[in-house]
Image (cartoon, rainbow, N blue to C red):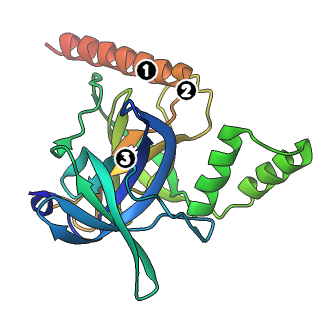
Amino acid sequence: MVRDVVAIGDKVELKRMDKNEDAVKKIYKSKVLDFKDYASVIIAMPIIKGRVIPLSVGDKYSLRFFTQTGLYECKGLITDRANDDKVYILTVELTSALEKYQRRQFFRLSCVLDTDYYIATEAELTLRYKLKQNIFKSPEDKQACIDALEQCKKEWKLGIVVDLSGGGARLMSENIHDVGSTMQMMIHFNSKVSMKSDCLMGVIISTEKMTNRVGFYEYRVQFLELHKEDRESIIKYIFEEEIKQRTKDKNNL
């Protein structure tokens, strides 16, 4: 039953599926507003740059729900859309079972690495998407997008990465953030690591208030759009740190 896993207010991402039921790249973001029955959810109509995106009845989507217990995926069919007291809503029938999203497994390293990070705004994410698509009428339009991205508000905060892999990280922070938020991280490695990107982008897939450290929260972050070179650099760093730790442990015997 969907409401046993998903809660009202949970964020959800939708990817349009073609006739072969393959998800296309465009992602729409929404949130759960209510439940119609045991197999249908009512979600908000996606909004991009202040404009409501009227997804069509009868279209199929791949859905990813960001819940307090992790990410869940399924397929869905839009069966209705309406305007409920000036709130545009969609009814989505879940056509497959909810399955917990299993990330590709990477070797994980326990660590303590200082980290500067901030939560990206919707405006920043929209500008990044436009640059990724690289569809501009002129070089001036592209440069204007780049300039606007540089002006986006960034509230840097401090965190500590306590677990790292090629697929993501576990981070401690005194600040409260929502599951589904996009995070830009600048990890301060304790040895030289050649990174192509200044910041690593990731999405918060779970959050938990720490019981053994008052005032702190623990976040699991899945990396997004990670350059192949950066992933390889992280994996190399993890491998070298593991060797160092094993050598240290051996010498202490």
Instruction: Classify mark 2: helix, strand or loop.
Output: loop
| Distance Cα–Cα, label 3 vs label 1 | 38 Å
- Do the numbered discs 1 and 2 sit on residues whose CB atoms are within 8 Å? no
In the image: residue 117, left or right of residue 242: right
Where's residue 3, x and y in %? 13, 63
Q: Quadrant of residue 199?
A: top right
Splitting the image into 4 quarters, where does residue 248 fall? top left
State the SS at label 3: strand
Report the label total: 3
Q: In this orientation, which residue lies closer to the viewer: 74 or 187?
A: 74
Q: Which residue is mark 1?
A: 237
The dot on residue 88 is: none
**Where residue 2 sits in the image (x, y, percent)?**
14, 58
Residue 206 visible in image: no
Query: Which circle's residue, 3 or 1, is located before the other in the chain?
Result: 3
Nearest the viewer among 186 and 242 is 186
Q: Is residue 160 above or below residue 38?
A: above
In this orientation, which residue lies closer to the viewer: 73 or 113?
73
Quickly name the residue at label 3.
61
Query: Can you say which quadrant of the picture contains the C terminus?
Result: top left
| Distance in Å between CA atoms under marks 1 and 2 | 15 Å
